[in-house]
Amino acid sequence: MDILHWFTLPLQHEFMVKAVLVSMVVGVVCAVLSCYMTLKGWALMGDAVSHAVLPGVVIAYILNIPFAIGAFVFGVSSVIAIGYIKEKTRIREDTVIGLVFTGFFALGLVLISKTPSNIDLTHILFGNVLGISDQDIIQTLIISAITFVTIAILRKDLLLFCFDPTHARSIGLNTGMLYYTLLSLLSLTAVAGLQTVGIILVVAMLVTPGATAYLLSDRFDYMMLLAIASGVLSSVLGTYISFYLDAATGGCIVVLQTLFFVAAMIFAPKHGLLVRMRQKQAAA
């Protein structure tokens, strides 16, 4: 099978066209946000929010309202709960995050087990981009647009907040507003990734592209471009590979992203393991 036929054959199916396009959009929006998440060191926070939206999705299904509404409400609620417990107790933030997201996630699993449904809600856990509906596509596009516009408007403020929140506060920026804005965007993006890779793997899309790009560039603009390239390439190729292997699409996408990270970790021109080994040998 030649390479052109390999790429064009899946596109003869409408569901594959939709899946590739949605995966590309989600890959871009997750990659953009992952740059800020990497700089802020919020990988665990991303894990918390992405898991905490599960009960919101199930409740939204029960109430027959869009999944995005329930997921966003519970995502923001988890953030507020984390902030409140951290402020009112002596427990460390990482412990609080672990407590909140496992509690919310467990509640979601209980609701799934007790909710009679003709729809397999476990698709929310692992994604189902190959069976995505037109309504879900529109929802994903709207969420992605909101995230892009918000980041474009607050780009410099968010960047300074992630790099140096103390300096951001000293020049008059409302760091509290930026904190909750970034976490709200995280909740929205987690919802956008539900249909593609599911709740369990969406945290990888929110962390891995930014981490990969961070190894390859010291400039934020280049870092974001590299993250987007990594996110889009892994999303598209992962969708294709899942088609030919008849494997889980979300799993294929995240495995590719992980391989890209491993390659960057080894071969990055300034921060790769090979370069560091050569520097140690030269110093010795």
Image (tube, helix red, strand yellow):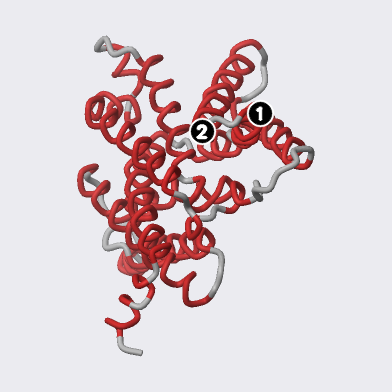
**In the shown orientation, is residue 200 left or right of residue 228?**
right
Identify which residue, 86 or 194, lies in the foreground: 194
Amino acid type indicated by mark 2: Pro
Residue at 40%, 30% (x, y): give it: 185
The image quarter in which residue 71 lies: top right
Nearest-to-viewer mark from 2 and 1: 2
Q: Alpha-carbon neighbours of circle 2 within 10 Å: few (<14), some, or many (≥20)?
A: some
Q: Alpha-carbon neighbours of circle 1 within 10 Å: few (<14), some, or many (≥20)?
A: many
The answer to which of marks 2 and 1 sits earlier in the sequence is: 2
Residue 156: percent from the left, percent from the top? 22, 27
**Could you tell me which quadrant the N terminus lies in?**
bottom left
Picture disc at residue 100: 1
Picture disc at residue 66: 2
**In the shown orientation, is residue 198 left or right of residue 268?**
right
Residue at 72%, 40% (x, y): give it: 112
The secondary element bearing badge 1 is classed as helix
**In the shown orientation, is residue 94 left or right of residue 144?**
right
Amino acid type indicated by mark 1: Val
Farthest residue, direction bottom:
1
The image quarter in which residue 39 lies: top left
Res 264 seen here: no
Residue 230: percent from the left, percent from the top? 33, 58
